[in-house]
Amino acid sequence: MRTLAFASVIFLAALTQASAQCTLFGSPGGSGCGSSTPWGIPTIRCSGAPTVGNQTYAIEANIPCQAATPMLMLGGCLATPYRITGPFGAGGFCGPTEASCLLFVGPSIYAGVPGVSTAPPSGFRFALPIPADPALRGGVVCAQMFTLCATTGGACIGASHGLFVQVQ
């Protein structure tokens, strides 16, 4: 609980001035990392509107692989996504995939928020309560989820597409 409160404070303190929205960066299942078969690529989405005073705001994930505790990285938004290549080519950390594996968050990382399982084995939630502080209106942060997926040969990297979050 203390880690979550600390991450929320860092998340909120890092917001820069800029209306409430949650916009996809990349395409769900098409610009993250993972394996097309047998698991799939992790995806994330906003749960609720990122508005001042929304204590239930969260980002939810669907992680089709057997995952370790996923981490949601919050930070600045890269002007141009960075393509990550793996040992199996673009996006191929868990074997060949059609996904492009793009990094959307950086170069500054403000916080890493651990996920909480909501619908085992693939549902996770990252709680990001937003205080009722008008100074947060217009704040912007980007988010992307990363995890280790269990495979028969060990573990590999799973990552989602990105989200652009702007507080209203």
Image: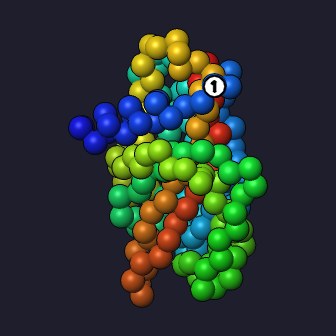
Residue 91 in the image: state x and y as whole percent: 65, 73
Q: Mark 1 points at which residue?
A: 17
Camera-side residue of 27 and 133: 133
The reply to whether residue 124 is visible in this rendering is: no
Residue plotted at (42% across, 87% down): 153
Camera-side residue of 104 and 37: 104
Camera-side residue of 137 and 29: 137
Q: In which quarter of the image is the N terminus?
A: top left
In the image, residue 140 above or below residue 54: below
Residue located farthest toward the left when viewing the structure as drawn: 2
Residue 50 in the image: state x and y as whole percent: 56, 26
Looking at the image, residue 95 sits to the left or right of residue 5; the answer is: right
Residue 57 in the image: state x and y as whole percent: 47, 28
Residue plotted at (28% across, 42% down): 3
The reply to whether residue 137 is visible in this rendering is: yes
Query: Residue 70 appears in which quarter of the rendering?
Result: bottom left
In the image, residue 98 above or below residue 166: below
Residue plotted at (68% across, 82% down): 89
Looking at the image, residue 72 sits to the left or right of residue 87; the answer is: left
Looking at the image, residue 4 sits to the left or right of residue 141; the answer is: left
In the image, residue 38 above or below residue 168: below
- Using a 10 Å C-alpha cutoff, classify the residue at mark 1 as few (fewer than 14 neighbours), some (14 to 19) or many (20 or more): few
Q: Quadrant of the C terminus?
A: top right
Query: How many numbered marks are there?
Result: 1
Query: Residue 141 appears in which quarter of the rendering?
Result: top right
**Colour convention:** rainbow
Secondary structure at badge 1 equals loop
Residue 149 in the image: state x and y as whole percent: 44, 70
Residue plotted at (63% across, 25% down): 17
Residue located farthest toward the right when viewing the structure as drawn: 80
Q: Type of residue at label 1?
A: Gln
